[in-house]
Image: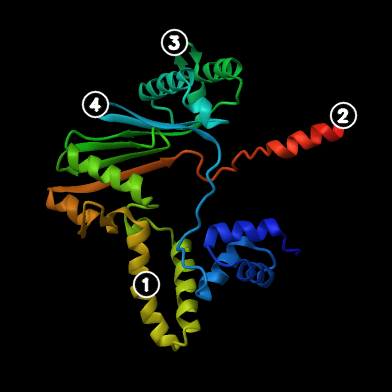
Amino acid sequence: MEVTASMVKDLREQTGAGMMDCKKALSETNGNMEEAVNWLREKGIAKSAKKESRIAAEGLANIYVNGNKAVIVEVNSETDFVSKNEEFTSMIDTIGNALLNSDVKEIEEAKKINTSEGTIEELIVNKTAKIGEKLSLRRFEIVNKSDDEYFGTYIHMGGKIAALTVVKGSNENVAKDVAMQAAAMKPLYVFPSDVPGDVLDNERNVLKEQAMNEGKPSDIAEKMVEGRIKKFYKEICLAEQAFIKDGDLSVEKYVANNGGEIVKMIRYEVGEGMEKRCDNFAEEVMNQVKGN
């Protein structure tokens, strides 16, 4: 498979490795991006433990709470300019409150919910026509808690990141601290037990190859893997992360010291994992000139 400049660029952005190293990794793995990332990590060239998703569509994320029920929602627009438009923010509030008063689980169900301006689907269509950009309800999750649990909510960068947590026992301030941690430190899971087996197996394989490439014998490499897996958990699991307000404590220990335990965490970052719209104004102008 031909290795293109674009592929090399994408791999550099994901790993921070040099151009020639990225080109060689892609050549060695026949252009497979995921295998190329692992190849670089095995050689000790790329140290990132996880790939960073490209931030894509613009929009806002928000959280709505009523008693023991909360909903976290992301609505997308094409440009950041529109995401600050009052029409757009008002639409998100309408959608969020409508979802909060429902028990739907899927997007298609959500679109049929009635609001003061028609169904959610009709509302989005009408606002799309009025604002002049494609708007869409991307995702949401409704969360219910018990009376002895607390919601923690945190909105960062005006709605670019939203984190919703549930803590059993303790208090609302502790739950909010956990939500702030989630927003800031981007955990992928709450507990090590939540990490899927295939993700863990892949990490173990990469870490073992790293150790063996450092010249360690197989049995020593195996022991090193276990130590590095613990570090891996501290990077990607909320409970294991160092608490941002006191680095001597894990988040789980901080919550426990305050008489509670972490139950749930949801973190939305607007546009994560989606292809970003990329307009090249100069190229557009040149194409128009050529067409005249």
Query: What secondary structure is marked by label 1?
Result: helix
Question: What percent of the width, then of the height, locates residue 218?
Answer: 45, 86
Q: Earlier in the sequence, mark 2 or mark 4?
A: 4
- Picture mark count: 4
Question: What percent of the width, then of the height, locates residue 50?
Answer: 47, 59
Residue 109 seen in the figure: no
Query: What secondary structure is marked by label 3?
Result: loop
Q: Earlier in the sequence, mark 1 or mark 4?
A: 4
Question: In this figure, which residue is indicated by the disc labeled 1?
Answer: 228
Labels 1, 2: front one: 2
Q: Marks 4 and 1: in contact by CB < 8 Å?
A: no
Q: Amino acid at mark 4?
A: Gly
Q: Earlier in the sequence, mark 4 or mark 3?
A: 4
Question: What percent of the width, then of the height, locates residue 81?
Answer: 52, 28
62 or 46, nearer to the observer:
46
Question: In this figure, which residue is indicated by the disc labeled 3?
Answer: 116
Q: CA distance from mark 1 to mark 2?
A: 61 Å
Question: What percent of the width, then of the height, locates residue 190?
Answer: 33, 52
Q: Is residue 97 above or below residue 145?
A: above
Question: In this figure, which residue is indicated by the disc labeled 4?
Answer: 67
Q: Earlier in the sequence, mark 2 or mark 3?
A: 3
Q: CA distance from mark 3 to mark 1?
A: 54 Å
Q: Quadrant of the N terminus?
A: bottom right
Labels 2, 3: front one: 2
Q: CA distance from mark 2 to mark 3?
A: 48 Å
Q: Amino acid at mark 2?
A: Asn
Q: Amino acid at mark 1?
A: Arg
Query: What secondary structure is marked by label 2?
Result: loop
Q: Which mark is residue 292?
A: 2
